[in-house]
Image (tube, helix red, strand yellow):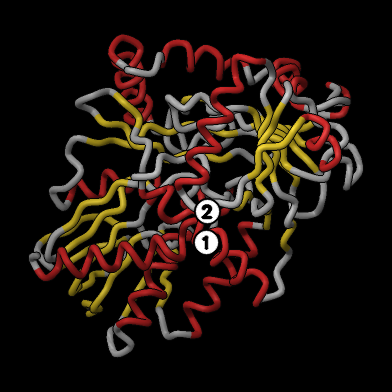
């Protein structure tokens, strides 16, 4: 039996659910259906992220990430407060390990001001007043609006809101193929007015089926954190290093979780298949082969020294090395306090196959019948509410042929 829907959204992560909510608000008489291949929401990026709600000072002023992180920060925190979900408004300190990193602090401060983000340059003494254990050279940056929450609880609250608005969520329905206005999933056939692809790790494959994103592929990176067994409250705030602005990763940092404990990480290790969360689970040979070929090409042609990045990241599998990388950030970070790894996450990082470069900003494509969010990695969770509003604007323009 064929099911007719006005809007079919593929992927029930934080972006997909917010897109569904935005479409339903704008078109209350239209039917909106979300399909997801898993049995429950939050099995991938939206449920496995760090829980940090970013404030928006890392990103260049002309980027989509800069445009939506600041507003997303306040919108997401408002949503969390309204539903009385846990929220740790602990802030963030960005530190410099030596004088060579001070110019990057100034660059981040400049970006923050350009993006309208509340951000303060403080002395090392002022930093220690905020967090007694912090270590920095001369100066640091203080971001009071950075916070942490529980991504699973937040996603569940969005799911409940979607169902309350009459949005249909169909679990265990993986996209299979499309032909004209018809879409096949695991056990359903849909006649669709408009298709929205928010499939995260598989967004590129679905886009390719519709004729979009041909120059892109997902290149997955595996993120792991080491959890500390120190008591809750051992750190007051998140502590981040000065990042390498040539790539989209923020370096090993101390993250204060929503319950007041802390962890260090993450890794950004190239994953060998898209769902390489643990051992050989979900192993797909074709994905391994494709990633090995793409990785080999980046070793030779990338513009950000992928060879060095891959080598450094693989070393982080050693607990001792990951702890050593965190020690310039704060006092008292000892190997014996980090005895177990947290659950792994996979970053659905978009790779430009022509330039062999990692896409730094959000990427989307679409036309009159479908729209594809190809790159919505961090800070996608933070940006999800205003970014979804913007994406629906772009969809409506594309659908009208403008």
Q: Quadrant of residue 7?
A: bottom left
- Dot 1 or dot 2, earlier in sequence: 1
- CA gap, disc 1 to disc 2? 8 Å
Residue 100, image x, y percentages: 60, 14
Q: Secondary structure at mark 2?
A: helix
Residue 308, image x, y percentages: 47, 11
Tell me the residue that label 2 is attached to.
46
Q: Residue furthest bottom?
A: 29
Q: Secondary structure at mark 1?
A: loop
Residue 168, image x, y percentages: 40, 78
Residue 295 in view of the camera: yes
Kindly check if marks 1 and 2 are in contact, taking CB atoms under 8 A apart as contact: yes
Q: Which mark is residue 375?
A: none
Q: Quadrant of the N terminus?
A: bottom left
- Residue 43 drawn above or below residue 390: above
Residue drawn 52% across the image and 44% down it = 112
Residue 341 in view of the camera: no
Q: Quadrant of the C terminus?
A: bottom left
Q: Is residue 152 left or right of residue 122?
A: left
Residue drawn 23% across the image and 70% down it = 189
Residue drawn 26% across the image and 31% down it = 352
Q: Which mark is residue 41?
A: 1
């Amino acid at each position: 039996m064929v099911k007719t829907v006005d809007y079919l959204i593929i992927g029930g992560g934080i972006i997909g659910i917010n897109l569904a909510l935005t479409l339903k608000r704008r078109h209350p008489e239209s039917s909106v259906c979300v399909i997801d291949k898993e049995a429950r929401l939050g099995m991938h990026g939206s449920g496995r992220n760090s829980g940090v709600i970013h404030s928006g000072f890392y990103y260049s002023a002309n980027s989509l990430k800069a445009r939506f992180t600041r507003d997303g920060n306040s919108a997401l925190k408002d949503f969390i407060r309204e539903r009385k979900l846990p929220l740790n408004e602990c802030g963030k300190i960005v530190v410099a390990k030596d004088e060579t990193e001070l110019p990057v602090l100034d660059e981040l401060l400049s970006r923050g001001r350009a993006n309208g983000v509340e951000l303060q340059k403080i002395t090392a003494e002022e930093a220690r007043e905020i967090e007694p254990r912090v270590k920095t050279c001369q100066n640091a940056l203080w971001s009071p609006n950075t916070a942490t929450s529980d991504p699973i609880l937040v996603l569940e609250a969005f799911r409940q809101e979607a169902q309350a608005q009459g949005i249909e969520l169909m679990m265990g329905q993986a996209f299979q193929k499309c032909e004209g206005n018809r879409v096949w999933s695991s056990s359903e056939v849909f006649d669709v007015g408009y298709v929205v692809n928010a499939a995260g790790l598989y967004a590129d494959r679905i886009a390719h089926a519709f004729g979009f994103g041909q120059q892109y592929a997902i290149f997955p990176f595996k993120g792991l954190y080491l959890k500390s067994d120190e008591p809750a409250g051992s750190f007051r705030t998140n502590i981040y290093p000065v990042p390498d602005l040539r790539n989209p990763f923020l370096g090993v940092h101390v993250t204060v979780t929503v319950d007041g404990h802390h962890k260090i990480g993450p890794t950004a290790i190239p994953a060998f298949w898209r769902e390489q969360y643990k051992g050989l689970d979900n192993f797909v040979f074709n994905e391994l082969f494709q990633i090995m070929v793409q990785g080999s090409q980046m070793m030779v042609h990338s513009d950000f020294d992928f060879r060095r990045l891959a080598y450094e990241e693989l070393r982080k599998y050693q607990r001792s090395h990951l702890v050593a990388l965190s020690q310039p950030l704060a006092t008292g970070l000892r190997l014996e306090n980090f005895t177990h790894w947290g659950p792994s996450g996979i970053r659905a990082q978009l790779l430009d196959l022509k330039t062999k470069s990692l896409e730094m900003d959000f990427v989307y494509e679409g036309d009159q019948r479908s729209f594809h969010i190809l790159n919505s990695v961090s800070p996608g969770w933070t940006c999800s509410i205003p970014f979804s509003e913007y994406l629906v604007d772009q969809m409506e323009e594309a659908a009208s042929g403008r």
